[in-house]
Amino acid sequence: MGKLQIIGRLARVAASAVTPMALDEATKIINNQLDKRKHYVKIPDVTSLPLDEAAKVLEQYEFNYALVKLPADIKYADNDSNTVLRILPKGGTSVDPTTFVKVYYADADTIDKSNTLFKDMVDQKIDKQEKHRQTVRDVANKSKQVAADVGNKITPRKRNSDK
């Protein structure tokens, strides 16, 4: 009988002795967690809704919430002003009804600043591409110049038939 077979038999005996106790404990833990979460409700997904509508929905579910204005960022350039951009905890999550919800939004000023940041980023990208193209042109022109200079310095060999 090999070592693996002996270990396998010992593991089977140990598992059969421990399994009923472990199952009972696991069942107790799972039941406790399910009992705690019986009264949980799902947070409605209010992203992309206007602030006033989102507030009404959250008040219907009796959630405590706060409106948090986001700072300007490139990713908010295409969004509408005074709409919900994200919420924490995320929509669709089951939570305790007393959970505090943060509603993140951007106002018109933030959207304008975000658009400015986006345009600046695009301009920088275009400038970088143009600099790269100019560098490639300069290298190509320098290569042509060096090739022409080398060609002028090399004197052609005379063939015996040309004498």
Image (cartoon, grey):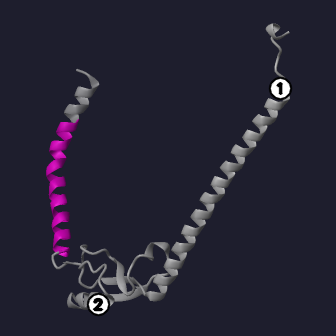
| Label 2, label 1: how far apart the Cα atoms are | 83 Å
- How far across and how far down the image is residue 131, in percent? 66, 58
The residue positioned 30% from the left and 78% from the top of the image is 47
Q: Magenta stretch?
A: 11-37
Q: Dot 2: what SS?
A: helix
Majority SS type along the magenta span:
helix
Query: Is 113 in the magenta?
Result: no
Q: Which disc is residue 55 wearing?
A: 2
Quadrant of the drawing holding the C terminus: top right
- How far across and how far down the image is residue 65, in percent? 33, 88
Q: Which disc is residue 86 wearing?
A: none
120 relative to 99 in the view: left or right:
right
Query: Is 31 in the magenta?
Result: yes
Q: Which class describes the residues within 10 Å of circle 2: few (<14), some (14-19), or many (20+)?
A: some
Q: Quadrant of residue 93?
A: bottom left
Which mark is first along the chain, 1 or 2?
Answer: 2
Q: Quadrant of residue 33?
A: bottom left
Quadrant of the drawing holding the N terminus: top left
**Residue under pointer 1:** 154
Rendered view: 59 above or below 115 = below
Foreground residue, 124 or 160? 160
Q: Dot 1: what SS?
A: loop
Q: Which class describes the residues within 10 Å of circle 1: few (<14), some (14-19), or many (20+)?
A: few
Foreground residue, 91 or 162? 162
Rendered view: 158 above or below 67 = above
137 relative to 56 in the view: left or right:
right
Q: Quadrant of residue 13?
A: top left
Residue extending furthest toward the front: 162
Residue type for callout 1? Ile
Residue type for callout 2? Ala
Query: Is there CB contact under 8 Å for labels 2 and 1?
Result: no
